[in-house]
Image: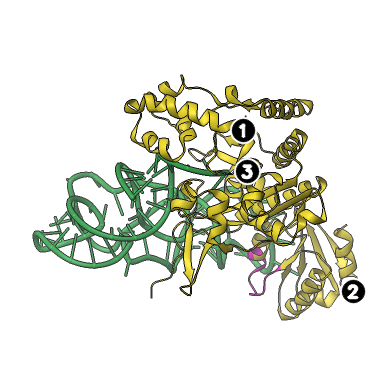
RNA sequence: GUGGGUGUAGCUCAGUUGGUUAGAGUGCCGGGUUGUGGCCCCGGAGGCCGAGGGUUCAAAUCCCUUCACUCACCCCA
């Protein structure tokens, strides 16, 4: 019989990889808590309409990457391709905006996009998503970014680049859009096929094009920052000033655009050189009208999404190894009486919260010692027929290779003492 | 959706112009005289050579198809 394999683009996360993941998630819980965020858990499945309205009908995500199906042939449902729309849906559905003026939420979980898998890109991938709903002042933007970088630093990640930009607002972005459109239309013949398509779908994306001729044209194009209205310019400058206050290094990238329609004003991205083409580890930004567009009051928000797979890929295997300590004790036995005694002791200690391992197969002492060594056990207790009759056992320190005799009657106390 | 690369032991990979029972390292199991780990030495288990078809006396090797993985485009976390 053939075995059944996982679906393309869907991955099993196995140990020791899971140790890294837990470390990442635990660090997020701690750091976010300190910054006043509460966890929210939301469904993986939503009505398709939520993402069409939230992310934007003409985005790649909605157009061709969503897992959408008819539930019993009636209602169109979609596996969420991102978290922000769902968080806001829950925020509105439970009237959280009425309960408090500032709401800070985060959630961790899988997202689904039907893209061609490649390094750092999977069809089910995982994000840590944080959102601040309510305030729209520039310090909030800076605070969120500050928390993000603090989190990344806690994980010991280096060689990351923070890039920021302002996309403007409803007042000034249309003017820029017109300017860039008329500029590009004038030189449409020289653009690559992809860019001509972008002209219709998302003109700002042309800035990202890697084709040389396009890049050359773009270098002469009008730039977004020159079109920002006074309000947006002021907001953006204050964000930068706040970042400088905490000595956060950042790069201004006037050409950075985002793939989701809802972003306004501040946008940011954290990239790394380690991950090949999928170099974005974090993406985020402000969305001034998303809450309104999803049927709520006109409340502003800002958030980011961290790619856990991409983050985990940056933590070296050696570091992950250190995350998993070995057992405190391995019990090696010889003979049935010793095995029974060890079985009782081993599980008794475990129930006291001490990590103890043993072998039930009755192998040679040598192979049990090998096993203890491999597991990186700090101590090995040798319990044979001889020890049973003499009512004692040998406790071996695996690091110093020294061993002492310990009384059988006080074994549990002795080991518990070691655990301190 | 479009290109390129790769599929041989649990893992990392060799496998010469097609030619006997398909190899190594690592990991796993056992052993190196009485019941003691790491280093070293010896032995063992473990492979429908991704799948299907074709060429041939003979295919892991050549051809076709297909699937999977992978990298890049695209997109994005």
Mark 2 Cα-neighbour bin, 10 Å: few <14, some 14–19, many ≥20: few
> Disc 1 or 3, which lies upstream in sequence?
1
Q: Which mark is residue A171?
A: 1
Same chain for labels 1 and 3? Say yes or no.
Answer: yes
Mark 1 Cα-neighbour bin, 10 Å: few <14, some 14–19, many ≥20: few
Q: Nearer the viewer, residue A295 or A116?
A: A295
> Disc 2 or 1, which lies upstream in sequence?
1
Task: Please state which of the two labelled residues, at mark 2 or mark 1, is closer to the viewer.
Answer: 1
Which chain shows up in yellow?
A
Q: Nearer the viewer, residue A7 or B14?
A: A7
Which residue corresponds to mark 3? A315
Q: Which mark is residue A409?
A: 2
The percent position of residue A68, horizontal first and vertical second, equals: 48, 62
Judging from the image, mark 1 belongs to the subunit labelled A
The answer to whether residue A68 is magenta is no
Q: Secondary structure at mark 1?
A: loop
Q: Secondary structure at mark 2?
A: loop
Q: For the N terminus of chain A, give its image quadrant.
A: bottom left
Decide whether the magenta segment is chiefly helix, strand or loop. Answer: loop
How many numbered marks appear?
A: 3
Range of the magenta residues?
A358-367
Asked whether, in this view, residue B62 is left or right of residue A337, the answer is: left
């Amino acid at each position: 019989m053939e075995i059944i394999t996982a679906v393309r683009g869907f991955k099993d996360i196995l140990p020791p990889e899971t140790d890294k993941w837990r470390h990442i998630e635990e660090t997020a819980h701690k750091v976010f808590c300190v910054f006043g965020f509460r966890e929210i858990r939301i469904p993986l499945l939503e009505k398709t309409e939520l993402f069409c309205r939230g992310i934007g009908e003409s985005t790649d995500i909605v157009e061709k990457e969503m897992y959408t199906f008819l539930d019993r042939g009636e209602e169109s449902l979609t596996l969420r391709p991102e978290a922000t729309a769902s968080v806001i849906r829950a925020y509105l559905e439970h009237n959280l905006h009425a309960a408090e003026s500032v709401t800070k939420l985060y959630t961790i979980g899988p997202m689904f996009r039907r893209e061609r898998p490649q390094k750092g890109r999977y069809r089910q991938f995982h994000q840590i998503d944080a959102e601040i709903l309510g305030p729209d002042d520039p310090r909030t933007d800076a605070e969120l970014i500050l928390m993000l970088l603090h989190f990344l630093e806690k994980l010991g990640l280096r060689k990351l680049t923070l890039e920021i930009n302002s996309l403007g607002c409803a007042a000034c972005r249309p003017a820029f859009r017109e300017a860039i459109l008329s500029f590009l239309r004038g030189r449409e013949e020289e653009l690559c096929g992809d860019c001509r398509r972008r002209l219709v779908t998302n003109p700002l994306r042309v800035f990202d094009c890697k084709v040389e001729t396009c890049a050359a044209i773009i270098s002469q194009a009008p730039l977004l920052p020159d079109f920002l209205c006074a309000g947006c310019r002021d907001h953006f400058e204050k964000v930068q000033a706040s970042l400088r206050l905490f000595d956060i290094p950042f790069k201004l990238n006037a050409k950075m655009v985002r793939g989701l329609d809802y972003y306004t004003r501040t946008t940011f991205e954290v990239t790394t050189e380690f991950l090949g083409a999928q170099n974005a580890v974090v993406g985020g930004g402000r969305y001034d009208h998303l809450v309104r567009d999803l049927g709520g009051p006109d409340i502003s928000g800002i958030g980011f999404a961290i790619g856990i797979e991409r983050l985990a890929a940056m933590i070296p295997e050696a570091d992950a190894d250190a995350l998993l300590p070995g057992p405190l004790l391995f019990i090696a036995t010889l003979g049935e009486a010793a095995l029974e005694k060890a079985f009782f002791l081993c599980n008794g200690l475990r129930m006291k919260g001490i990590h103890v391992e043993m072998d039930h197969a009755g192998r040679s002492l040598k192979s049990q010692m090998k096993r203890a060594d491999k597991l990186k056990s700090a101590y090995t207790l040798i319990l044979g027929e001889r020890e049973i009759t003499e009512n004692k056992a040998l406790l071996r320190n695996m690091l110093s290779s020294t061993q002492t005799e310990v009384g059988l009657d006080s074994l549990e106390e002795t080991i518990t003492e070691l655990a301190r």
